[in-house]
Amino acid sequence: MFEILLYIALFLITVAMFGLIYRVIKGPTTPDRVVALDALGITLVAVIAILSIILRTNAFLDIILLIGILAFIGTVAFSKYLEKGEVIENDSNL
């Protein structure tokens, strides 16, 4: 019964990922695309976690952590770029 629920959750998350990919491509504004890209990273972590449970292995836990960190850093960089127009600030007053 639990395995059937895992497969159903995997299917629903995959459908959600297709919706997020559509939003990344056709998003009306750039912030909408950034939010969809962040949500895509979170759903990718969820898919890998469910696959790890189904396969009964913990080999994917490092990959989950890496994808989570990269998604967070990417979201922060995109947000800073949208706010200030640059990711790395150069102080020319030194």
Image: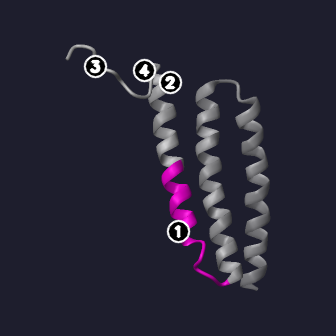
Image location of residue 92, percent across then percent down: 27, 14
Q: Is residue 3 above or below residue 75?
A: below
* C-alpha separation, residue under disc 2 versus residue under disc 4: 6 Å
- N-terminal-most mark, 3 or 2: 2
Region in magenta: 56-70
**Label 4 crowd (10 A; few <14 / some 14-19 / many >=20):** few
Residue behind mark 2 = 82
Give the residue displayed 47% in from the left and 35% down from the top: 77
- N-terminal-most mark, 1 or 4: 1
Q: Nearer the viewer, mark 3 or mark 2?
A: 3
**Label 2 crowd (10 A; few <14 / some 14-19 / many >=20):** some
Q: Nearer the viewer, mark 3 or mark 4?
A: 3
Amino acid type assigned to the residue bearing label 4 in the image: Lys
Callout 3 secondary element: loop
Residue behind mark 4 = 84
- N-terminal-most mark, 3 or 4: 4
Residue behind mark 1 = 62
Give the residue displayed 48% in from the left and 31% down from the top: 79
Compared across the picture, whether 65 is left or right of 18 comes to left
Q: Which mark is residue 91?
A: 3
Image location of residue 63, percent across then percent down: 57, 65
